[in-house]
Amino acid sequence: MQLIDGKHVAATIRERIAKQVEQIIAAGGKRPHLAGVLVGHDGGSESYMASKVKACEQCGFTSSLIRHDSDVSQETLLQTISALNNDPDVDGFIVQLPLPRHIDEQRIIEAIDPRKDVDGFHPINVGRLSIGLPCFRSATPAGIMMLLEHYQIDTRGKHCVVVGRSNIVGKPIATLMLQKATPGNATVTVCHSATPDIAAITRQADILIAALGKPHFVSADMVKPGAVVIDVGTTRVEDPTSPRGWRLRGDVDFDNVAPMCSYITPVPGGVGPMTIVSLMHNTLLAATRQIYP
């Protein structure tokens, strides 16, 4: 069993991005600028946004953060998005999800200029992804593909089973694994809450991607010996022995599943760091106009 070290891979990619930024600046270009919009004071969102700001510093980007209270009106939030769309200095921006219930998330996503949609959630980017056109890829699925590429994990003709059908991870990673590319070219099955006998399907997987947000859902009896297991889950579980009072748990019962695998991602330290570095990569693509000239 080999542990897939997302922290190491992410650090390598950040260093590469930082060197590219140095070259851009040396050639008289503009420093890439990533902006973030944060609504409310959710602890998880605050922590995640802080990690993005730190990653921007490591990559040599300019970063800015716009805050709104949780009772912000939808119209005010749309005005903020319009201002960012029209700011020539901002190359890309994100609106941290989830948003308060009184905000229509889909309307907010669709208001973002696709050329600045570095989260890859806008329907135009999703549509371009589905037919294999250049686009901003959703950060977590893009990070998973980077891990598979880094570890030279063979995906061609393999049976990939994705557990979870979210718009953020499940659907886009299934699409990426289907495409004629390396990594990719896999045969893909997507399981979800209405799938009967999920274990019978996951046991067929050469590559199993768990992305449903249920701690320890994937048990050892659901995994084929020698499979590659990618755990996307990051659920906070109460733990009085932890200084923070909680720990992150993945969707996979790591201790019992890991001995069966050829490769497996830990939680934390697996997919998580790749999500943030993928966002940095998308921002660099936006700044250099590599997706939308």
Image: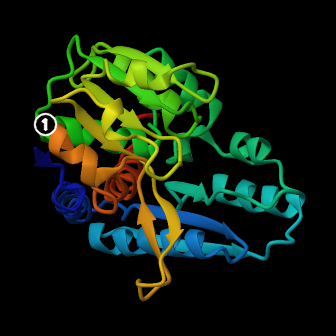
Location of residue 10 by image quarter: bottom left
Q: Between residue 89 and residue 218, name the one nearer to us.
A: 218
Per the image, label 1 sits on a secondary structure element best described as loop
Q: Which residue is mark 1?
A: 262
Q: Between residue 288 and residue 107, name the one nearer to us.
A: 107
Q: Residue at x 60, y 28 (%)?
A: 124
Q: Residue at x 57, y 19 (%)?
A: 196
44 above or below 278? below
Location of residue 165 by image quarter: top right
Q: Residue furthest front?
A: 221
Is 37 on the left or on the right of 157, as rendered?
right
Q: Between residue 276 and residue 134, name the one nearer to us.
A: 276
125 above or below 253? above
Q: Residue 287: horizontal and vertical position, in percent?
A: 40, 51
Q: Residue at x 18, y 49 (%)?
A: 4
45 above or below 132? below
Mark 1, Cα crowd under 10 Å, few <14 / some 14-19 / many 20+, is some
Is 158 on the left or on the right of 253, as rendered?
left
- What is the count of numbered marks? 1
Q: Residue 275: horizontal and vertical position, in percent?
A: 39, 52
Q: Between residue 96 and residue 33, name the one nearer to us.
A: 96
Is 55 on the left or on the right of 195, as rendered?
left
Q: Residue furthest bottom?
A: 243
Question: Can residue 139 be spotted in the picture?
Answer: yes
Location of residue 184 by image quarter: top left
Quadrant containing the N terminus is top left
247 above or below 263? below
Question: Can residue 134 be spotted in the picture?
Answer: no
Q: Residue 19: horizontal and vertical position, in percent?
A: 17, 61
User: At label 1, which amino acid type do we have?
Assistant: Ser
